[in-house]
Image (cartoon, helix red, strand yellow):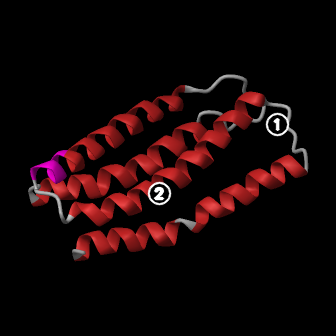
Amino acid sequence: MSPESGRTDGILLVIFPSVIFGGISLLSLLVERAFGYVDNPMRQNLWRAGHAHAGALLVLSLVALRYVDEAQLSDRLKGFVRSAIPGAAILLPAAFFLSILWPGATQPNGLINLAYVGALVLAAGLITLGVGLLRR
């Protein structure tokens, strides 16, 4: 593993406990029947989606980073992949969480559009890595 990939892996592993904390926070909102959460299905669904995407995309990032150095890509494209997939792990959950911060909100605000940006960044990173592995 290259130093760049190892450094990114290390950062992701240090960040990962925040997803665990987020899960515990969501659980406490349910158990305590917190106002603005249990009575707001939109907020529940988006926050649940944010938590799930954060965990799944961080795991995907860790797996993808194992393959970046094996891909036949320029250093610049390897750097893009190392940033794109973990970046999507930030953009997508941020869209879900930040788009409905106010407890009384029944519809997501404009920050939900970060989800589309995150999805495009993720797709670009995955396609780039896939093509690089196929060219190997």
Q: Nearer the viewer, residue 17 or 126?
A: 126
In this rendering, would 87 be left or right of 133? right
Q: Residue at the spot x=55%, y=54% of the render?
A: 55
How far separated are the C-alphas under marks 2 and 1?
A: 28 Å
Residue 53 image point, x, y percent? 54, 46
Q: Quadrant of residue 42?
A: top right
Magenta region, main secondary structure? helix
- From this viewpoint, which residue is outermost toward the top? 107
| Secondary structure found at label 1 | loop
Asked if residue 134 is among those painted magenta in the image, a careful observer would answer yes
52 is higher (above) or lower (below) than 65: above
Q: Judge from the rendering whether residue 29 lies leftward or rightward of residue 89; answer left or right.
A: right
**Where does the image place residue 23, in percent across and percent down from the top left?**
69, 56
Is the residue 27 above or below the residue 18 in the image? above
Q: Is residue 71 magenta?
A: no
- Is 2 rendered above or below residue 38? below
What span is in magenta? 131-135
Q: On the rendered image, what quadrant is the C terminus found in? A: bottom left
Question: Which residue shows up at 59% across the image and 34% down it?
Answer: 99
| Residue drawn at 18 percent across, 53 percent down | 133
Say which quarter of the image contains residue 18: bottom right
Q: Please state which amino acid type lies under the numbered disc 2.
A: Leu
Identify the image quadrant of the N terminus: bottom left
Residue corresponding to mark 2: 58
Task: Name the kind of residue labelled 1 in the image.
Answer: Gly
Place of residue 127 in the rendered image (x, y in percent of width and height, measured from the top left): 25, 41
Residue 36: which disc?
A: 1
